[in-house]
Amino acid sequence: MNMAFATSLYPATGKRPIFKIINPFTCNAATRRNLTVRRNFSCSATVATDITARVSEFEIENKKNDLLRLVQDTQRGLVTTPDQRSSIEEALVSLEGYNMGESVDLVRLDGTWRLQNTSAPDVLVLFESAARFPFFQVGQIYQKFECRDQSDGGVIRNVVQWSIPTLLEEQEGATLLVSAKFNVVSARNIYLQFEEISIQNIRISEELQALIAPALLPRSFLSLQILQFIRTFKAHVPVRNPGDPGRRSVGGLYYLSYLDRNMLLGRAVGGGGVFVFTRAQPIDL
């Protein structure tokens, strides 16, 4: 139906008003064109924003792949040349720029992360020992964060899988666990309060099992008890402050410089080194 509105015009002569029928579909044509342009502009802006976001995500994934490519031949940081270290640092800084100013997302941080590369001296010494001594192996190293339901902190567990060949299973013969509580102290910094060091999850080799309890002979109660004891053995040592044994260790600052769904970059404040992690499957401790 074509609806119209009546509007009155009052001539200066004071005569009766003249009524003129005005069709809104005619008088508002320019307005409708403006609305159409605005709608088209809004849709174009949305599409442009979506494309920009996709391009940015694509760039980030490329930078992450570049970083992993740079570290893949370094034996997790043990073997690096000055040029490699420079290229890795440049790739780190480039990637860190995408998270700059954002607060730590504890829900995203929660979970298990596998170490891909580090320059931390206290970790490199383990790799150096394994390279120097044939009776010592270092397997995977993880950081496990437990903070999903927390608002300002949680628990972090540094997990080192290691072994003594012929005595323990290859690479995963035992687990060294360093546990700490952490609190978020700024947008990207967390403060670690180390609690305890423990050795657990001991898995002896088949050769040692055969020595303790030969499969071809009747296994005595004592031999079975020895095997059970080894498998369930756990040693816990509280971390103390060297200057005051009665107090806990003071811990340290850890700067989470980049975090997304599958990569975590961290820097130990005070020259403790950098860390490159990728998301891993959950591990039982």
Image (spheres, rainbow, N blue to C red):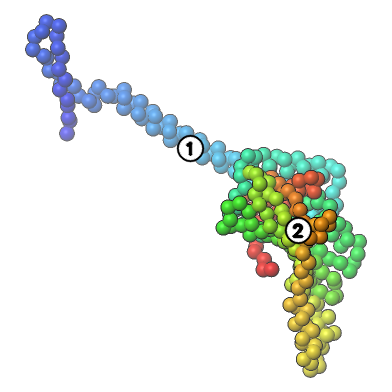
| Labels 1 & 2 near each other (Cβ < 8 A) | no
Mark 1 → mark 2, Cα distance in angstroms: 55 Å
User: Is 224 rendered above or below residue 120?
Assistant: below
Residue furthest toward the right? 132
Residue topped by disc 1: 47
User: Is 75 rendered above or below residue 17?
Assistant: below
Which label was assigned to residue 248? Answer: 2
Is residue 8 at least partly visible in the picture? Answer: yes
Q: Amino acid at mark 2?
A: Arg
Q: Which percent across, then down, holds residue 194?
A: 74, 58
Residue drawn at point x = 88 percent, y = 61 percent: 129
Q: Which percent across, then down, holds residue 75?
A: 81, 55
Q: Amino acid at mark 1?
A: Val
User: Which quadrant is the N terminus positioned in?
Assistant: top left
User: Is 218 rendered above or below residue 16?
Assistant: below
Q: Residues within 10 Å of mark 1 (few under 14, many from 20)?
A: few
Residue drawn at point x = 68 percent, y = 57 percent: 181
- Depth check, front residue: 214 or 1: 214
Q: Secondary structure at mark 2?
A: strand
- Depth check, front residue: 254 or 11: 254
76 on left or right of 46? right
Q: Residues within 10 Å of mark 2 (few under 14, many from 20)?
A: some
Is residue 158 at least partly visible in the picture? Answer: no
- The number of numbered discs placed on residues in the rendered structure image is 2
* Residue 157: quadrant of the picture: bottom right
Q: Which percent across, then down, holds residue 186?
A: 65, 44
User: Is 4 rendered above or below residue 50?
Assistant: above
Residue drawn at point x = 28 percent, y = 24 percent: 29
